[in-house]
Amino acid sequence: TLPKKAGHAASQRRKSNYIHYKLKNKSIMFISRLKKFHISDFWSNTLASTIGTIVGIVLTFGTSHLIESRQEAVRERHVALMVIHDIEGYCDLVENTMEEWEELDSINNFILNYVSEDSVQIADSTLNFFLENIGLCNVWAYNITTQNIFNSNIEIWQDVSDKNFIENTGKCFSLMSVIDETHEEYNSYLRQAYDSYLINVESVLTDDISLRQEVQRTIQEADVKLAIDLLSRSLDVYKDNLYYIRLLNEQNKKIMNISDEELSAIFKGGSIRTF
C-alpha cells in the first residue's frame, strides 16, 4: 500500500495526463475541422477568377463612364463654340448693315427736310444716292443651323450642362427673330416704295424736269415717306436688340470659358482645341 502523499501525487498525475489527452484530442479535431474549411486549389482559382471579373467589370464601366463623360464635355464645347460663333457672326452682319443704313437714313432725312428749300444746295451725287437706294432691299445671308438645332433637336442641348447658357442662347435667338421680322417688314415697305417710284419715273420721262425736281416729286409719294420713316425706327430696333444680344453672348463666353482667340480660330478656319 502506497503512503497517503504518494497516492495523492499519483492521482494528480493521472488527472493531468487525462486533461492533456482531452486537449490533444480536441486540438486534433479542431485542426481537422479547419482542414475541412481549407480552400482548395479549385476554389482558390474560382475566387481569383471571380474577383478578377468583378474588378474587370468595375474598370470597364468606370472607363466607359470616364470616356463618355469626356465625350459629353467635348460635344458640349463644340455646341457652345458653334452657337457663340453664329450669334457673333449675326451681330457683325447686322452692324455692317446698320453702318450703311445710318448713312442712308441721314441722307434721307436731309433730303426730306431740305429738298424743297431752293436756298439749300444739294449735290447731284446726294440726290442720285437717294434715288438709287429707293427700293434697294438688303437681303441677309447667315447660318441658321444653330437656331434650327435649338428649336428642334433637344438631344444636342441635353449635352449642355449649364442651363444659364441655354437660357441666354434662347434669349439671343428670340431677339434675333425680332430684328429679322423688323428687317423683313422694312424690305416689304421698300418694295412698295420702289413700285411707287417706278410709276413716278414713267411720268418723269415725259416731262422735262431737273434731278432735284424728280426727287421732290418722288419724296411726296406716301410709300416713299413711310419707307424713310420706317428705316429710322428699324435702326432703333436693331440697336436696342443688338446691344442685348452682344451682352448675352459675352455672358455665354464666360460661362463656357471660351476666349476670343479660340473663336478667331473658327473664323479663320483653323483648328479648335476643345479639350
Image: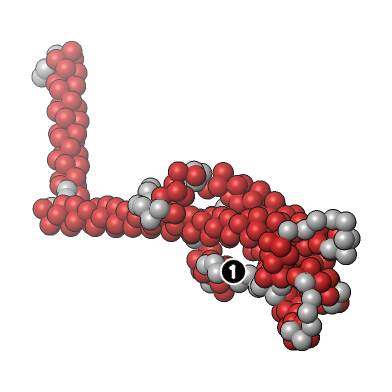
In this view of the protein, which residue sits in the foreground, 36 or 48?
48
| Picture quadrant of residue 188 | bottom right
Task: Tell whether 25 sits left or right of 264.
Answer: left
What residue sits 14% from the left and 15% below the top? 6
In this view of the protein, which residue sits in the foreground, 251 or 108?
108
What residue sits 20% from the left and 30% below the top? 19
What residue sits 18% from the left and 25% below the top? 16
**Residue 128 percent coordinates (x, y):** 69, 67
**Residue 95 percent coordinates (x, y):** 63, 55
The local secondary structure at tag 1 comes to loop
Q: Residue furthest front?
A: 208
Rendered position, 230 above or below 242: below
What residue sits 77% from the left and 72% below the top? 210
The quarter in which the N terminus is drawn is top left
Observer able to see residue 167: no
- Name the image colouring: secondary structure
Rendered position, 17 above or below 211: above
The residue identified by callout 1 is 140
Q: Amino acid at mark 1?
A: Trp
